[in-house]
Image (cartoon, rainbow, N blue to C red):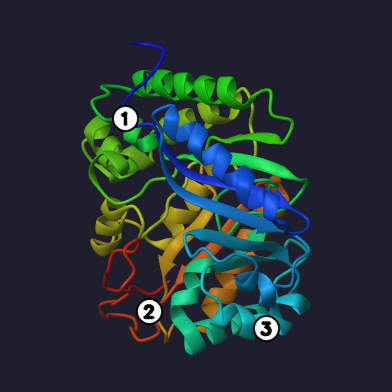
Amino acid sequence: MPKTLHQNKVVRSICYFADKFDDSLLKNLESVHEILLSSGFEVQTKRLCLANEPLGSMDSLVNDDSIYLSAGSINRESAGSNLGHFLSSKNTSFNLELTAGVLPEDVELLQEIISENAEKTFGFAFTFSNRKSSPFFPSAEFEKNGFSIGLQPTDLAEGCLDLEEWFSRMGFMWDEIIELFNKYPDFLGIDSSVAPLFSGKSSLINFIKRLHGSFEKAVTTDTFLKITDFIKSENPRPAGLCGVMFPCLEDFELAEEYDKGRFPIERNIFLAMHCGLGIDTYPVGIDESPKRILEVLRLLRALSVRYGKALSARFVSDGKAKIGENTRFQNQYLKDVIIRPL
């Protein structure tokens, strides 16, 4: 195995964190981008997480629709007062930190987003015991100024016959990134989360099915625990979440499992508890019971507090589909499915 991998080196996100915006952030972001490109990496997104900029003014700060913006974690009061700005924004996201407790009004906030501009559910999440400096939105949260890098390591599994071969490739990629940026004082580290996308080599479920024959069988093996142990313990410069993501509708082959009834909410939470990061891009019908959503959020919060584990919930809706109906997201990152009850 060569120490430099020339294929499938995919960076999902470069994210600069800052308390306030200034033009140097854009220059620094582009500089990191160019260094990665010149080293053979594919870079999918560039992002800014700004802790002390009003949610309503963020769009006016950056005249570049390709840069994703986040207000990070905000409280209940701020979320409510800035909801209108969020709903009318372009690339802005945030998360609502609820480690202290979940109230019915938090579900009402989600319902209002669904009712007023459902596509913005993609940029909103509830978080519990959140980790700082993750470059993945909408869970990003500011801790200090600097940048972190998040990867799409599923692509490295192409052609791998076992976990160990995949782990070796991930390790080489981490080392290469650290060699590039270790001398940068504002380099916060690598979020070594497994962030799947679409199908084929980019899908975690595709690789899991190659190893085990079926997703269902793999769920009750220690495979996902092995993955989590590796990305948490072997990452030489960890930042952010460093877990296995199960984005229900972004990993298109996981969406197919959902469509066949093999990824119900309890299986999602089971996997999240021993290796994952919560509920992600999970479809919810516009007629789903608010009481049921509240129950799920309170369970996530209780599990997060009991085990000191970062968990989040990002429910998505197209604003039209009810339980039993087919979604029409018109979002390239979300696969349409028939919605099931939570």
Residue type, mark 2 in image:
Asp
Q: Which residue is drawn at 62% across and 55% down?
A: 48
Query: Regarding mark 3 in the picture, which secondary structure is present there?
Result: helix
Q: In this view, does 325 lie to the left or right of 244?
A: left
Q: Do the residues labelled 3 and 2 touch (CB within 8 Å)?
A: no
Place of residue 83 in the rendered image (x, y in percent of width and height, measured from the top left):
64, 82
Place of residue 143 in the rendered image (x, y in percent of width and height, measured from the top left):
77, 48
Q: Mark 2 points at which residue?
A: 318
Check the image and report above or below for 156 versus 329: above
Quarter location, residue 262: bottom left
Q: Residue at x 43, y 30 (%)?
A: 38
Numbered circle sitting on residue 157: 1
Q: Looking at this view, is 56 or 337 the one in front?
A: 56
Question: Which image quarter holds the C terminus?
Answer: bottom left
Place of residue 116 in the rendered image (x, y in percent of width and height, measured from the top left):
50, 89
The answer to which of marks 2 and 1 sits earlier in the sequence is 1
Numbered circle sitting on residue 105: 3
Q: Which residue is drawn at 31% across and 42% down?
A: 202
Query: Regarding mark 1 in the picture, which secondary structure is present there?
Result: helix
Residue type, mark 3 in image:
Glu
Q: In this view, does 291 lie to the left or right of 330?
A: right
Dot 1 surroundings within 10 Å: few (below 14), some, or many (20 or more)?
Answer: many
